[in-house]
Amino acid sequence: MATCSIDGLEALLRELDVGVPIPTFAGSDARWKPIDIYRSYLADTASKVLGCDAGLAYEAIQSAGGKDNSDLTLVLPKLKWGNSDPKDLAKETFMKFRSTPLFQMPLPDGVHLRFVFSTLSLPRLVLSYIHDRMEYYGQGRPLIDQMIPLIDGTTKKMIIEFSSPNLATKFSSHHLRSTVLGAQIANLYETMGWDVVRLNFLGDWGKEIGLLGVGWKKFGSEEAFQENPMGHLHDIYEKINEQFKPEKETSRKARDEGHDTAEIERQGIFAERDGFSKRMEDGESEEIGFWKRVRDASIAYYTHEYERLGVKFDEFSGESQVSPESIAEVESVLKEKGIYEESDGSWIIDYSKHGPKSLGVSVLRGRTGSTSYLLRDIAAVLDRSKKYSFDKMIYVVAAEQDVHFQKVFQALRYMGHEDLAAKLEHVNFGKVQGPSKGLKEAHLLGEILDQSVKDTSDALRSDSNGHTEINDDEKSVEILGVTSLITQYCGLNKRATSYTFNSQKLGPFEGNTGPSLQLCYAKLSAKINDSNPEEAVLANIDYTYLQEDPWMDLIRAMAKYPDAVDAAIKSHEPSLVLTYLFHLAEELQYCLNDESDDKSGSKRKTSPEEPPEAILAQTVLYKYAQQVLKNGMAILGIVPIS
C-alpha cells in the first residue's frame, strides 16, 4: 500500500537516493503509471541542464521503440534549444547530462538523446509498485485508503450499448465483434473508475418482428419452439424471408425506376408484415403476446450464451422499450421547429434542407403509421438521459452504421439538445469477413461458441508439442475456445480494420494467439509452484539477481502496462492491450525457457546450479509478471485456465 500515495512513492525514491518531491506535469500521474516517474524526473533534469521550459521538456519526451535499445527519448528540436547543426545537437547536449539513480548516461542519436533506465533502481521501483497494487495495477484509480473512483475524485456515469442482435435474424460476425469490443471498452472505462452501465439494445420491434409473426402463422410449431426456441424462430424467419424476396425485389425495382411502390406494398407478404407491425404498435393482444414470447425466449437464450463468453449486461433494452412519451416528444419538437414534415403519407426529416446535405432524407414514421428505427433511436437517447443522467454514451456498432448515428446526433441538435448530442459517440469497427466453413454455418451465438470450442479441442488433441501445462478437460477446452474467439475478434487487427477471420488461429499454442497467452500463464503457474512460493515474497529477495537480461527486459515490459491501458482507453482500441500482452509473453518466454534464442540470436542457458537467492528473486518476478498478465487478460474478458 505504501507506494499507492505520493508520500509513499517519495519515501521509496529517497531510499533509492532520488531527490523529492516528484516533479509534476499536466497529464502525468505517478500513482498510476510508474514510467511517469521517469518522464517527470527526466523533464525536470533536462530543463535544468539545458535551461529550457520544463513543460516543453516533458512534451518532448517519447517512449522509445524496442529497436532503439532505450526506454525514453528526448526529441531535442522540440526544446527549441541551441543553435548547432541538427546533426551535432545530440552530441553537444550529451555532454551536459550525468547518470542518475534513475537513468544511465544518455545515448546521442541524431537529434535525439536516448535514455536507459538504471538497472539499480528499476527492479526495486517497479516490483514495489506492482506489489502495492496487484489486481489494481494498471487502473487509473490508485489505492490509498480505499478505492478512488477517478483520479480527480469524481465518479462519472457512462452508458455503453453493444452487441444488439436482431431477434428475428441470425447472430452475425458484426454482432460478435460488437459484443467483444463493447465488453472490453466497458472494462477499460471501469478501470478508470467510471460507473458503467452495459446495455443491450435488442432489435425486438418493427417490421422484422412483423415478418417473423407472419412466418409463425405459416410455419410455427409449438413443439419445435419448446424444444429449441431460438433455432426454430431462426428457421421460420429464413423460410418466410425466402418467400418475401420476390416481393422485395419487385418493390426495389419499381423504386429504382421512379415508380410509386405503395400499391405493391399494399398486397401479399408486404401487407401481412406491415399489418402485423401496426397491430403491435396499437397494442393488439395477440401480436403483443407473440412478441413477448419471442423476446422472453431470446433474452433467456442470450443471457446463457453471453455468460459463456464472459459478458454480462446490466439491462436488456430494445426498440420495444422506447417510451411512447419520448417518441411523442421527438415528433412534437421537430414539428415545432419546422424540421418534421409529411411526404406521401410518411413523416420525414429532410437533412439536405437543414444540413448537412450529405445525410439526405429519412423516414421517421411510415405511411402505415409504424415508427422507424431512427425515430426509436432518437427517442431512446431521451429515455436514457432521464433515467441515468449519463456523462457519456457510446454505441459500439459496425462502421456501416456511421450515417445512421450522424442522423441521430443531428436530429438531437435540431431539437436543441446540443449538450446531449455532445455526450454521444459512435465507436465503429470494420467487418469480419470470410469465416471458416464451420463458423459460416453457425447462425446463433451458441452455435458459434460451440464451433470455436470444437476447433480448439481438435487443435489441442492434435498438438504435437505436448503442452502438458494445459489440461484437456471440458472446462479448460471451453475456456480455450472462448479465449481463441475473443483474441480473433479483439483483435489481432485494429478496430477500424476489416479482416478475414482465420479459423487456423483458434487453436495453435505458438505465435500471437489466445491459446499462447493461456499457455504462458500456465507455464508461469508451474514455474512458481516448482519453487518455494511461500518464501517468494518481496521482502526476501536480493534485487541484484534481477539486474541483467532477460530479467531487466521483462521488468521494463511490466512497467509499460499502465501506458498500454491508457493508450487503449484514449483510442477505444482494446487491441493495444492484446498487443502488449503478446509482447509481455514474448519477454517471459526468454525467461522461462531453459534454452532459448535471445534477441541477439545467441542462446541463453539457465544454470542448474543457480543460487537459491537467484531462484527466489526470479520466482517473485514471475508472480508479479503473472499478475500483470492476469490484469490485462481481465480487461479483454479472458479467464486464465487455473
Image (cartoon, grey):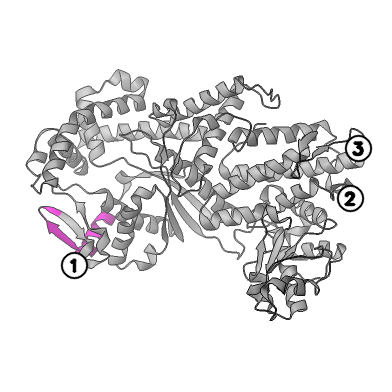
Q: In this view, does 106 lie above or below 480?
A: below
* Percent of width and height locating residue 241: 23, 31
**Residue that carries the numbered disc 2 in the rendered image:** 544
Is mark 2 in CB contact (under 8 Å) with mark 3? Answer: no
* Percent of width and height locating residue 490: 52, 42
In the shown orientation, is residue 616 left or right of residue 110? right
Q: Quick one: label 2 or label 3, which is nearer the N terminus?
A: 2
**Residue that carries the numbered disc 1 in the rendered image:** 338
User: Magenta span covers which residues?
Assistant: 325-346
Is the residue marked by circle 1 packed among few (<14), some (14-19), or many (20+) residues within 10 Å? Answer: few
What is the total number of numbered labels drawn onto the structure image?
A: 3
Looking at the picture, tell me which residue is in the foreground, 401 or 282: 401
What amino acid does circle 3 point to? Glu
In the shown orientation, is residue 255 left or right of residue 500? left
What amino acid does circle 1 point to? Gly
Is the residue marked by circle 3 packed among few (<14), some (14-19), or many (20+) residues within 10 Å? Answer: few
Q: In which quarter of the image is residue 640?
A: top right
What amino acid does circle 2 point to? Thr
**Residue that carries the numbered disc 3 in the rendered image:** 610
Is mark 1 in CB contact (under 8 Å) with mark 2? Answer: no
Q: Helix, strand, or loop for circle 2?
A: helix
Q: Quadrant of residue 348?
A: bottom left
Residue at 76% in and 31% down: 526
**Front tag of 1 and 2:** 2
Q: Helix, strand, or loop for circle 1?
A: loop
Q: Quick one: label 3 or label 1, which is nearer the N terminus?
A: 1
Residue at 64% in and 56% down: 563
User: In the rendered image, is residue 24 in sight?
Assistant: no
Q: Quick one: label 1 or label 2, which is nearer the N terminus?
A: 1
